[in-house]
Image (tube, rainbow, N blue to C red):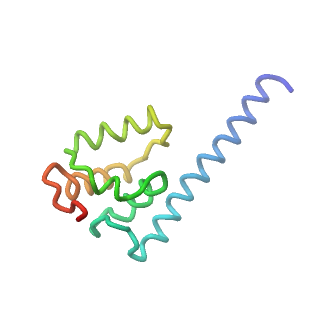
Amino acid sequence: MQSGHRIAVFAAVFAGMVSGLVSGVLSGAREAAAGDYGVLHEAEGVDLTYAYCAGCHSERLVAQQGLSRERWEELLVWMVEEQGMVEIEEPDRTIILDYLAEHYNTDRPHFPR
């Protein structure tokens, strides 16, 4: 098999994997829409936050944080660069950051008890 053909096949397989992952995350958001978000505060954006975050770790880990919006943004960048997380595309990224900045900020208004 020629090198160019191998790269094209790899690219197609990779694109399919990424598409499947994104589809699975969005499917998870629809399933979670029934109201099962664990300890996360129910408000606008909880469905996407739960779907994207709880796929890799407990939602309790998210709820225990008390970060500014800037620190949440830095954490997302770190997870992409260092942990292999797939970049969250717009508008989902802004919705999630808005949710986290409002409900899991330095004041920790919804810290789980």
Q: Quadrant of the N terminus?
A: top right
The residue positioned 23% from the left and 65% from the top of the image is 113
In x, y percent, where is residue 92? 38, 53
Q: Does residue 70 sit above or below 54 in this rendering? A: above
Instruction: Name the residue furthest front.
Output: 113
Horizontal relation, residue 38 to residue 87: left or right: left
Horizontal relation, residue 19 to residue 34: left or right: right
Instruction: Name the residue furthest right.
Output: 1
Horizontal relation, residue 54 to residue 108: left or right: right
Res. 52 image quadrant: bottom left
The residue positioned 61% from the left and 53% from the top of the image is 20
In x, y percent, where is residue 90? 39, 48
Q: Does residue 40 sit above or below 57 in this rendering? A: below
The residue positioned 79% from the left and 29% from the top of the image is 5
Nearest the eye: 73 or 108? 108
The residue positioned 22% from the left and 46% from the top of the image is 67
